[in-house]
Amino acid sequence: QECGLSMAVLQQAMLAEGELEQLVREFSSPRYKEGYEKGIHDFDACLLLRSLLPALESADLLRFDPSSRALAQVFWVNIKSRSQNTDSAALSYISWPERAQSAAQMQSTFHSKQAIELLAAEVASALTEFIEQHPIGVDKLTIRRAADYLVAELGRERLEFIGSKYAVTLVEELKRSINDETWRHYQLALEKMLGWPAERWNLSSAWLQAMIQDKQLHHLQRYIPEAVALINADQRLERRWTEVDLELRVESLMGDHPNIIERCLNFGLDEFLLRLQKHRDEVVPAYHRYLAIRQEVISSERDNLRLQEFKARPLSSFVRNRLINESYLPLIGDNLAKQMGTVGDNKRTDLMGLLMMISPPGYGKTTLMEYVANRLGLIFMKINCPSLGHQVVSLDPEQAPNATARKELQKLNLGLEMGNNVMLYLDDIQHTDPEFLQKFISLCDGTRRIDGVWRGNTKTYDMRGRKF
């Protein structure tokens, strides 16, 4: 349905070699954000479809889950009595069957579901009002599916509500489990609660639940609501029965999922479609909202942290000459190898030290280090020391004398918090106070530790073994 493909197209694709697989790949490929694994999920989806499509064709309206069908039946039985009144609400109920049949003919003629969707929305609104007056324990999705099911039943030429063999089994087992006298008392209690659908629903559910626990019929647990509707509305609804088997088994699956046991998946068709609609209507939109919010947070934090500033951008005019190759880089390389470590047999374990570069202004110290950071793939955390000045003696941003100094200290602590793949570059460090420089001594010896402040909390950063 999401692909815009009819059942006939899918069935034809099942017969054609490789065509179903192609349809699945075309549908799944753009959905990589939903955990799609190419190959594995394609294979499993085809196996599922080869079981689901024939079952869907034979299931008729049993594709709706038992709770939705039961709610629709109880609702319809209770509003039929109101339809004998003359108020406007009752008159709208009277018109539903004719409108549903007209909507079904519209869909058959023009392939448009607009009339069906409009009527289903009206039915869902009335159902919601009914649940508020008679609080039966169902969620919004069940109300929505119950409305869709009721419109589908009303759109048929003859109004007969479909019933499954599983609900009949439950009701017959309940009758066998109690004697005639107990059954008569139970029916008498239901008669006295006529007009109280929620109370009748709860009483019947309690009886069936107790019977399932006693008889160990847990595989029929989810058909309790349909059995409740069968008991409470048995004499007031026309029914059609079907022996369709809704329990499916798919084997030889490749995916990893809690419901897949020894490469086999057992599930009910109606339960699967209910979970599918819940996933499509609730989980996927919520996940997309999460992605949008996450992107907003990432963008906001990126702006706050100014991450683009920490990416090394060597000058396009930078030229490596013999002086750099034969003199500067060997010195710098040996020093950085001592600080960050090397690979192979010569790997150092005593990571320590610092690199101090001294030259007149404009000789390219910053340019050279930015180039090295770029080639090594390091975050280039450049701290503008003149902005700190001689007044700064602490790494705590809150103690900075002005906004500019505070921002530089926040950057410095961010570099410490990142810890790995970072080059901390203190530019023009001679403009800072000697007490400030004392903070970095322990970072440069064998302990490789420094005390910083991150988001108002003091932290001790240990850089041993880190590419820092």
Image (spheres, rainbow, N blue to C red):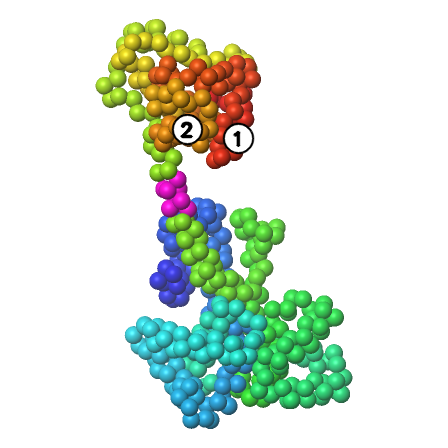
| Pair 1/2: label in front | 2
Three-letter amino acid code at disc 2? Ala
What residue is at 48 percent from the left and 75 percent from the top? 128
Three-letter amino acid code at disc 1? Thr
x%, y% of residue 140? Answer: 49, 69
Quarter that holds the N terminus: bottom left
x%, y% of residue 198? Answer: 59, 79
x%, y% of residue 206? Answer: 67, 75
Q: Which quadrant of the view contains residue 86?
A: bottom left
Q: Is residue 269 above or below residue 173?
A: above
In the picture, the disc for residue 458 is 1
> Marks 1 and 2, how far apart in space?
15 Å
What residue is at 40 percent from the left and 88 percent from the top? 88
Magenta stretch, residue numbers: 294-302
Residue 342 in the figure: left or right of residue 168: left
Question: What residue did someone put label 2 on?
Answer: 400
